[in-house]
Amino acid sequence: MALVEIRDVYKKFGHVEVLKGVSLDVAEGEIVTIIGRSGSGKSTLLRCINALETIEGGEIRVEGRQIHAKMPDLRQFRQRVGIVFQAFNLFPHLNVERNVTLAPLLTGGIGKAEARALAEDVLTRVGLADKIDAWPEQLSGGQQQRVAIARCLAMKPHLMLFDEVTSALDPELVGEVLKVMEAMARQGMTMILVTHEMGFARNVANRIVFMHQGRVWEEGPPAELFAHPKTPELKSFIASVK
Ligand SMILES: Nc1ncnc2c1ncn2[C@@H]1O[C@H](COP(=O)(O)OP(=O)(O)O)[C@@H](O)[C@H]1O
Ligand SMILES: [Mg+2]
């Protein structure tokens, strides 16, 4: 069974149709990379999967349950689906431990006594166990983004969504964040990620989805998709990112 089922999803902002009948299944443990030009609807699709946007048509199911912004247990649902954005959004007035454990403490997922151990665990997974008492401003952009990933992991998500998480980073910091994501992929996390890192897409993704003008234009395994693009739109996109 697919962990995520997206069926014929339509989304408008005002009169502008941004998603025009998107369908996509993601199996448990699968790594799906979404590529495409700016404005093709990639971020909107991720936000719909996390119920941050309402949709006008179609349906989205996660673990078999239909997702919508008015579901009664929206909070609990969001804990199962982690989302990391381009901007890291750490709380500047909280140290790393507090940033990472704030949500599970607030939702009652853990008590104060367990918070430290949880922070140590998830920070170890992103290679930052030694920064547990640091403040966000003392960290590089790459480290901050890894803390943001750790913060999601602290909620024990079943699915992770990443929206261009390395795009705002200096080039020398991109690799450390990609490495963390690669490790998560190896450990079996189901991930849907929007990225411009074509090397990562080729090497780590099981499947690549090329979005164009609000539609899934082409999809397939990386080797096949990059070597044999079927549409002129994908051909020209690949040429533009080389
Ligand atoms: N909150 C919003 N209000 C109005 N238009 C939006 C909003 N979010 C996105 N859009 C528009 O939807 C289209 C797709 O945007 P987006 O999903 O961000 O694309 P991508 O992530 O592929 O660059 C763009 O034309 C964008 O301007
Ligand atoms: Mg985007």
Image (cartoon, rainbow, N blue to C red):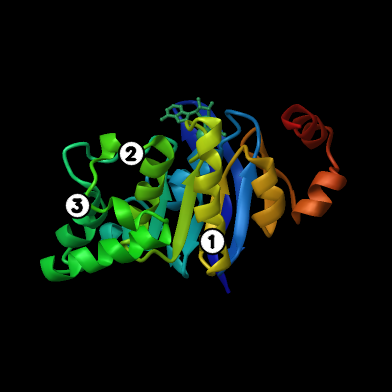
Residue at 40% x, 36% y is: 141
234 with respect to 15 (left or right): right
Q: Quadrant of the N terminus?
A: bottom right
Residue on which disc 3 sits = 98
Q: Which mark is residue 139?
A: 2
Q: Secondary structure at mark 2?
A: loop
Residue at 57% x, 57% y is: 182
Instruction: Report the amino acid beneath label 3.
Output: Arg
Count of numbered circles in the view: 3
Mark 2: C-beta under 8 Å from nearest atom of ligand 2? no
Q: Is residue 139 visible?
A: yes
Q: Is residue 102 above or below residue 167?
A: below
Residue at 23% x, 40% y is: 91
Q: Secondary structure at mark 3?
A: helix
Instruction: Report the amino acid beneath label 2.
Output: Leu
Relative image position of residue 236 (x, y in whole percent): 80, 29
Closer to the camera: disc 2 or disc 1?
2
93 with respect to 216 (left or right): left
Q: Is residue 233 above or below residue 148?
A: above
Asked if marks 3 and 2 touch (Cβ < 8 Å), the reply is no
Instruction: Report the amino acid beneath label 1.
Output: Ala
Give residue 5's quadrant in the image: bottom right
Residue on which disc 1 sits = 183
